[in-house]
Image (cartoon, rainbow, N blue to C red):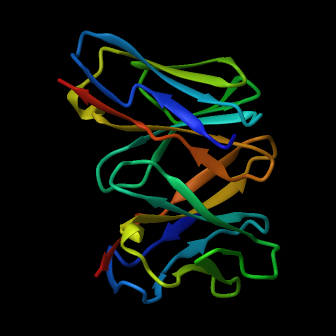
Amino acid sequence: AQKITQTQPGMFVQEKEAVTLDCTYDTSDQSYGLFWYKQPSSGEMIFLIYQGSYDEQNATEGRYSLNFQKARKSANLVISASQLGDSAMYFCAMSLPDGGATNKLIFGTGTLLAVQP
Amino acid sequence: DTEVTQTPKHLVMGMTNKKSLKCEQHMGHRAMYWYKQKAKKPPELMFVYSYEKLSINESVPSRFSPECPNSSLLNLHLHALQPEDSALYLCASSGEGGEQFFGPGTRLTVL
């Protein structure tokens, strides 16, 4: 069965420090995508970063990088130089293409990150 | 334009009311999604439209009725809802890359 596990319900980090949010996944499919989304208290789900299962390089987007370890089935998010505005809920998700135009997303339970000044 | 818009932002309705949520995207995406999210939980998929046709219904009660009038618009018609249906309703769309882009959501309260 496909599953995403985020074992950290909450995390604290000091401003300007780096933080790693853990995500492990389980699937028997060879082709899949891994995503991280940020959800501030306002509610909007903001797409941060994507890693395809066949991508050999770790994805990076500005201060966000995805530490993809395929053999361990982990896709941890690293946020460098944390800012107060990074305080939010972070969801890891996996997409399983259905052969058509759609991708069904499976979400983890989320990690609530609090950045302290 | 990489934006998905949703209206209204907030909605309060009684159990006998009929209301609709609207979602719009102009990214040329052919897949659109409705999610329901309760506080401190991940989003739960409700419906998926692919090329304006309903492709997935995750056993959602019939008091929720989706509609896709064209490739840019997605509606969710609400009728005879229950208080436990109060939640954040998120719309998303996706293109060939697979990333789903979400709208800001509608916070629904059913009295």
Percent of width and height locating residue B79: 35, 14
Q: Residue at x 52, y 68 (%)?
A: A4
Q: Residue at x 48, y 80 (%)?
A: A22
Relative height, residue A91 to residue B14 (above, below): below
Count of marks, rendered view? 0
Q: Residue at x 45, y 30 (%)?
A: B60
Q: In the displayed structure, does residue A76 sit left or right of residue A14?
A: right
Q: Nearer the viewer, residue A84 or B39?
A: A84
Q: In the displayed structure, does residue B97 sit left or right of residue A8?
A: right
Q: Tell me the quarter of the picture where residue B55 sits.
A: top right
Q: Nearer the viewer, residue A11 or B50?
A: A11
Q: Residue at x 42, y 86 (%)?
A: A16
The quadrant of the picture occupied by the C terminus of chain B is top left
Percent of width and height locating residue A110: 41, 66
Relative height, residue B85 to residue A51 (above, below): above
The quadrant of the picture occupied by the N terminus of chain B is top right
Relative height, residue A29 to residue B70 (above, below): below
Percent of width and height locating residue A42: 35, 49
Percent of width and height locating residue B107: 33, 35
Q: In the displayed structure, does residue B96 sit left or right of residue A39?
A: right
